[in-house]
Image (cartoon, grey):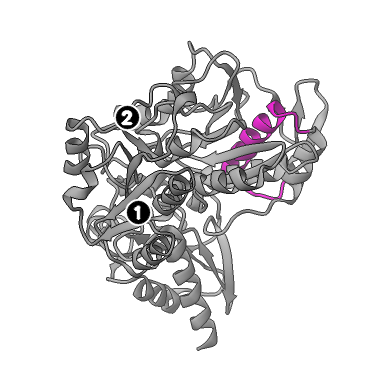
Amino acid sequence: MDISNKNKIDLNTVSITVIGLGKSGEAAAKLGNYLGAKIFLSDGGSTPDIMERQERLFSMGISVEIGGHSDKIFNADLWVLSPGIPQDADIVLNAKEKGIPVIGEIEFASWFTQDPIVALTGSNGKTTSVHLLTEMCATENLSPALSGNVGTAFSEVILMDLRDKPTHRVHILEISSFQMEYIVHFKPYISIYLNITPDHLDRYPGMDEYVQAKMNMIENQTQNDHIVFNNDDSILSQNFEDVDPQTHGFSILGKGETQFTMNATKIYDDAHATLIQLDQLALPGQHNLANALAAATAANILGVPNSRIAQVMSTFAGVKHRLEKVLNINGVTYYNDSKATNVDAVKVALDSFNTSIHLILGGKDKGGEFLQLLPHAQNKVKGIVAYGQAGEKISTALRDAVKIEQVSSLKDAVEICHLNAEPGDIILLSPGCASFDQFSNFEERGEVFKSIVKDLNQS
């Protein structure tokens, strides 16, 4: 299948194999089916979630196999690949050898919209920032739709839009490096880069490859498009020195030219008018200040009034699973930071508190260096409980410097912290790892944590 010209792509009667029956795979299958393609979906797993999605697709007449990949996957004109499948997987290499074009779900969905796309990526802070930006854009002149790596697949939104034909649509996407590995035509109007720190080094040979996957996001942008980036990040400031799109920095350190600047008490715009006083911000922490400036810069480019930007900054209180306050039990406060899936996110979480912390780390190792936590844990972390597949690695790395216990399950970890905590302490789930050893995603892990805490409160 020739996919070199986006405007000439017609899926009617085209055979498409979708690999991976997660949210994005199911959504891509439904979108392709709606556009007349012959869909075959294949997943190597057979979890209850996968089987439930299989039944939904069966009811639509879509062919699905689970529990393994048969040779039927190669009877296709096009592959749409789940972001969880690595580029060097045998089936992917075989598909390429057979001349089958391989793309990701984000690329696939982008073929079927002419509405502007704002794509946001970074190692940390993505979810908070896209929610902030979506709130800012909810005005009379814009109809934002949030999707991507944030719960709703892009293909699902595109399918709804093809049916409902909304006006003034702007697509706001949270993008992971995995989703940018198979880009052909994907072209944001605005690309936003929050930060780049070591992450997913279990997937990439090194930082250069990880950074390059992130940079794929801008490869189709032109001088009519925009890049918003963190001037305080040394990697980012170097990568955008000679690019075609218009560049817009943001900074909490006063670096470079920015649309919004700050001093000790306020944020002001490029006309030196006050946007908002710092003590009016709803989200605490320097990292959230950077997130807010990134969102505000993009919103400004889209024509959102400063009054709306300031209003959202003063009212937006955060998202689930990111430093989410759960309960206070007998003077001990529990926080759910399940979205912290790498070591740098844990650093940010630790830096957000000044009181004694009992820290829960663990899950599926992503190649993080847990020793980097020590400067942030000093004189603050009373103890660490490590659990799951990465528990042994975490314990080995930190046991000489901090009190640490190792257990198998998240439930055991919470119960140990509960027994050790005193009034005024914080119990913080900030795992620094992926969830996939024991949970289907970080959301499930966070919900289980909250359920365990609520059970403790009732016992």
* Residue at image location 34% in from the left, 42% down from the top: 16
Question: What amino acid is at disc 2?
Answer: Met
What residue is disc 2 on?
Answer: 1
Query: Whole-percent x and y of residue 195?
Result: 48, 33
Q: Which mark is residue 4?
A: none
At mark 2, the secondary structure is loop
Write down the region rendered in magenta.
281-304
The answer to whether residue 298 is magenta is yes
What is the crowding at mark 2: few (fewer than 14 residues within 10 Å), some, or many (at least 20)?
A: few
Quadrant hosting residue 254: top right
Q: Amino acid at mark 1?
A: Cys
Mark 1 secondary-structure assignment: loop
Percent of width and height locating residue 429: 45, 62
The image quarter containing residue 439 is bottom left
x, y percentage for residue 294?
A: 61, 33
Residue 262 visible within the image: no
Answer above or below: position of 445 versus 367. below
Query: Which tag, 2 or 1, sits closer to the chain's start?
Result: 2
Asked whether, in this view, residue 106 is left or right of residue 87, the answer is: right
Q: CA distance from mark 2 to mark 1?
A: 39 Å
The answer to whether 423 is drawn above or below residue 107 in the figure is: below
Total tally of numbered discs in the picture: 2
Q: Nearer the viewer, mark 2 or mark 1?
A: 2
Q: From this viewpoint, which residue is outermost toward the bottom?
A: 459
Residue 410 shown left or right of residue 367 in the figure: right
Closer-to-camera residue (105/74): 74
- State the image coordinates of residue 450 (x, y, percent, origin top left): 50, 71
For the N terminus, the quadrant is top left
Residue density around tag 1, few if under 14, some if 14–19, many if 20 or more, within 10 Å: many
Decide whether the magenta segment is chiefly helix, strand or loop: helix
Tell me the residue that label 1 is attached to: 433
